[in-house]
Image: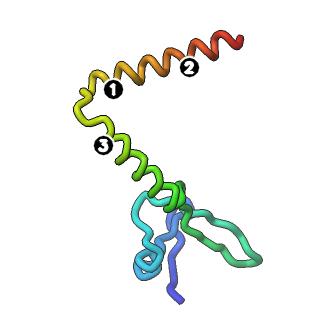
Amino acid sequence: MAAAKILEHGQITIPKQIRESLGLKKGDVVDARLEGDCVVITPKKLVAPEDWEKLLQMMNTVHEQNRGISEEEVYQDVQCAVDELRQEDYDKQ
């Protein structure tokens, strides 16, 4: 068991071996909870790995299907879509 010192503002440093074992890096988010007299820290994945992979695949497909479209055209299409959604929201009021 590795020891960790409580620093200012209740901060602790998770020992390197544990961080590496869990794949934790600076900026990662963790959950902390109390179980009896123990603090349990669990890595928190903001996006499930399988969902992230699906998103990447979809983005690659969209990218392949839209080769040759300029950044300006993409911006205009997005702006039109945003305007339409805003109009729909306005019409509902």
Q: Disc 1 or disc 3, which is closer to the eye?
A: 3
Identity of the residue furthest to the bottom in this view:
1
**Residue positioned 44% across, 57% down in the render:** 53
| Amino acid residing under circle 1 | Val
Disc 1 on helix, strand or loop? helix
Identity of the residue furthest to the right in this view:
36
**Left-right relation of 40 to 67:** right
**Residue positioned 74% across, 74% down in the render:** 35
**Left-right relation of 4 to 39:** left
The image quadrant where one finds the N terminus is: bottom right
Q: Residue beneath label 2, please? A: 85
Q: Which mark identifies residue 64?
A: 3
Going from N to C along the chain, the mark reached first, 1 or 2, is: 1
Q: Quadrant of residue 44?
A: bottom right
Disc 2 on helix, strand or loop? helix
Residue 49 placement (x, y as % from top left): 49, 62
| Amino acid residing under circle 3 | Glu
**Residue positioned 54% across, 67% down in the render:** 43
| Amino acid residing under circle 2 | Leu
